[in-house]
Amino acid sequence: KPFSGHYQNPLTKMSCRYTGMRHLRPRQDIITKTENMIKAGVMREPVWLKVLKRSPPPPLLLNSKKRIPNIVLPTDRLYKIRSRTHASTEPFFAHGQIQSAGFLFANRQWELMQTKNISEKEAYRMVEEQLVNMKAVSLDQLKGLTSSLKEEGASTALLSDPAVAKQFSEWQMRLEEISWDDWELGQQVMLDHWICKAVLKWDWEK
């Protein structure tokens, strides 16, 4: 056969062929791969191998046609309805994390619907009434605390509880170091939550 001007090494062709076939081999699970490496002397038997062989991981579904399910909570629709007329981005510290007031409102509404077996509108009205009552009680407590602070001073009113006094001292040192306006949102909400819970004794369930 005459020389065409292009020459390819047969070893290169073979390498390309087997490189392409390598991708057709099924993937080995971690147990089989580790055992093969131990047999080849590449590594020693790890301490976790026996435990993993007793409780092997589930197989990977690489070509699964199932899509991630769209999880819809029963409170999602209640939250959307509430957020139409009220600010949904208002931060609120509850259950150890920062949440929105609209999210907590929807959860409380759904809880009343389930526990009291009432309609959605009735539960909405009840939560609204609870919020009004909470604000009224909170204002009365705030007035009492304000008068107490004016008469006795902030340190005297808070030092009656050693734990609260210690926390108050820590917050005070924090405020002296960095202005409250320069705090991150999470830190600001945590301070507000501490004032409401530890000082004012406000509670959602009241």
Image (tube, rainbow, N blue to C red):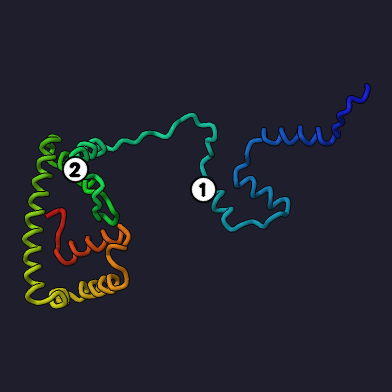
Q: Residues within 10 Å of mark 1 (few under 14, many from 20)?
A: few
Q: Residue at x 22, y 73 (%)?
A: 163
Residue that label 1 marks: 55
SS class, disc 1: loop
Q: Residue at x 8, y 49 (%)?
A: 132
Residue 124 x/y as whole percent: 13, 40
Residue 35 x/y as whole percent: 66, 49
Q: Nearer the viewer, residue 195 or 114?
A: 195
Name the quadrant of the N terminus.
top right
Residue 15 x/y as whole percent: 79, 36
Q: Residues within 10 Å of mark 2 (few under 14, many from 20)?
A: few
Looking at the image, which residue sits at the far top? 1
Left or right, residue 89 beside residue 128: right
Q: Mark 1 belongs to which amino acid?
A: Ser
SS class, disc 2: loop
Q: Residue at x 9, y 68 (%)?
A: 146
Tell me if residue 175 comes above or below residue 125 in the rendering.
below
- Give the mark nearest the N terminus, 2 or 1: 1
Name the quadrant of the C terminus.
bottom left
Looking at the image, which residue sits at the far right? 2
Q: Is label 2 or label 1 in front?
A: 2
Residue that label 2 marks: 86
Q: Residue at x 67, y 57 (%)?
A: 44
Q: Nearer the viewer, residue 142 or 202?
A: 142
Left or right, residue 74 beside residue 33: left
**Residue 81 image-quadrant placement:** top left
Tell me if residue 84 comes above or below residue 93 in the rendering.
above
Tell me if residue 48 comes above or below residue 2 in the rendering.
below
Q: Mark 2 belongs to which amino acid?
A: His
Left or right, residue 175 beside residue 118: right
| Gap between marks 2 and 1 measured at Cα | 50 Å
